[in-house]
Image (spheres, grey):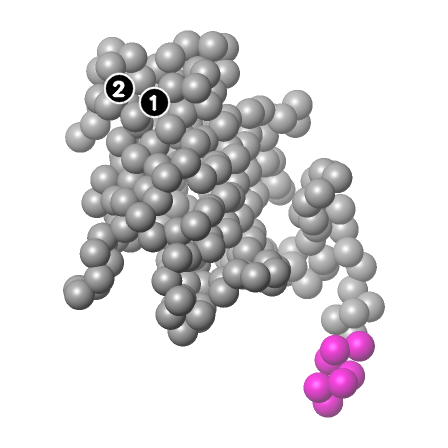
């Protein structure tokens, strides 16, 4: 029976999603059915020499890509909804659309909290989608990290693509591979929940989020008083 199921899965056509030279963003018919049911699609890629894999998660959000990215782009609010995150502070501009963010993650005792900084590059697609690529700057707990988020139109919703890779410094990291995967899914659910909650319960804030997003793409430094947040665009730090 398992062999028959495997053969059937291999016969499912793979549908192109986005075309990038070094990225595999494709969804099979089975994947589309999972998303239709509200279930995330998870993929793992082994990275040579690293104890943890690169993880990509696909999920859907009941908003537009602009609304989704607008809410996500409010970095100073990440600490309010991402699990175990204590700090998310804009700290340095490389350009209006490339911003360093300082984070602090709560780690169970007796380990020390993880403090790290990532660079975050914002870009926009011609199809109305948005993307942020993040890269390693400093970290107390990892040798390197990288990842991305993408929000693109998908069947009157938004397709959310979340990819992350972390190479931890700890020699014991391999023991926590399964827990790390669960934490990634937990973060994805938290992001989706935050965006849909803002859309449903605080819809009046959506235009301010989108305005800040578009102003960054036009070349404005929206976090004018780093590390504080912009006060005059309606997106405050509370």
Q: From the top left corner, tell me how far across and down residue 198 is, in percent.
A: 32, 36
| Residue 164 is at least partly visible in this image | yes
Q: Residue at x 50, y 50 (%)?
A: 164
Residue 48: name its quadrant: bottom right
Q: Is residue 114 above or below residue 29?
A: above
Front residue of 103 and 157: 103
Compared to residue 58, the image places residue 62 above or below, namely above
| Residue 201 in the image, given as x and y percentages of width and height | 28, 37
Mark 1 crowd level (few <14, some 14–19, many ≥20, 10 Å Cα): some
Q: Taking the image as drawn, is residue 158 in sight? A: no
Q: Are marks 2 and 1 in contact (CB under 8 Å)?
A: yes
- Quadrant showing the N terminus: bottom right
Q: Residues within 10 Å of mark 2 (few under 14, many from 20)?
A: some
Quarter location, residue 89: top left
Which residue is drawn at the image coordinates 41% and 57% (left, top)? 168
Select label 2 or label 1 by which is in front.
1
Q: What residue is disc 2 on? A: 226
- Image spot of residue 103 (x, y percent): 29, 40
Along the polypeptide, which appears first: circle 2 or circle 1? 1
In x, y percent, where is residue 85? 26, 47
- Disc number for residue 92: 1
Q: Is residue 4 magenta?
A: yes
In this rendering, would 168 be left or right of 237?
right
Which residue does the image show at 47% across and 10% down from the upper left?
A: 219
Residue 11 drawn above or below residue 5: above
Local secondary structure at mark 2: loop
Residues in magenta?
1-7
Q: Is residue 195 magenta?
A: no
Q: Nearer the viewer, residue 78 or 170?
A: 170
Give the side of residue 20 with respect to residue 49, left or right. right
């Amino acid at each position: 029976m398992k062999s028959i199921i495997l053969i059937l899965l291999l016969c499912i056509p793979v549908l192109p999603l986005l075309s990038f030279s070094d990225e595999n963003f494709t969804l099979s018919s089975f994947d589309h059915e999972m998303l239709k049911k509200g279930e995330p699609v998870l993929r793992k890629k082994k990275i040579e020499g690293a104890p943890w894999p690169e993880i990509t998660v696909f999920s859907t959000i009941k908003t537009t890509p602009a609304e989704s990215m607008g809410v996500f782009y409010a970095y100073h609010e990440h600490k309010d909804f991402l699990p175990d995150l204590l700090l998310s502070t804009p700290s340095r501009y490389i350009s209006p659309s490339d911003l360093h963010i300082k984070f602090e993650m709560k780690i169970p005792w007796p380990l020390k909290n993880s403090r790290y900084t990532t660079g975050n590059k914002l870009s926009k697609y011609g199809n109305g989608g948005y993307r942020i690529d993040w890269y390693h700057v400093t970290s107390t707990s990892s040798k390197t990290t990288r990842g991305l988020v993408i929000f693109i139109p998908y069947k009157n919703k938004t397709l959310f693509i979340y990819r992350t890779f972390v190479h931890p410094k700890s020699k014991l990291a391999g023991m926590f591979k399964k827990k790390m995967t669960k934490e990634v899914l937990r973060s994805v659910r938290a992001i989706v929940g935050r965006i849909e909650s803002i859309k449903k319960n605080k819809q009046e804030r959506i235009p301010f989020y989108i305005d800040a997003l578009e102003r960054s793409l036009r070349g404005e430094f929206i976090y004018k008083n780093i590390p504080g947040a912009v006060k005059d665009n309606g997106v405050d730090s509370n």
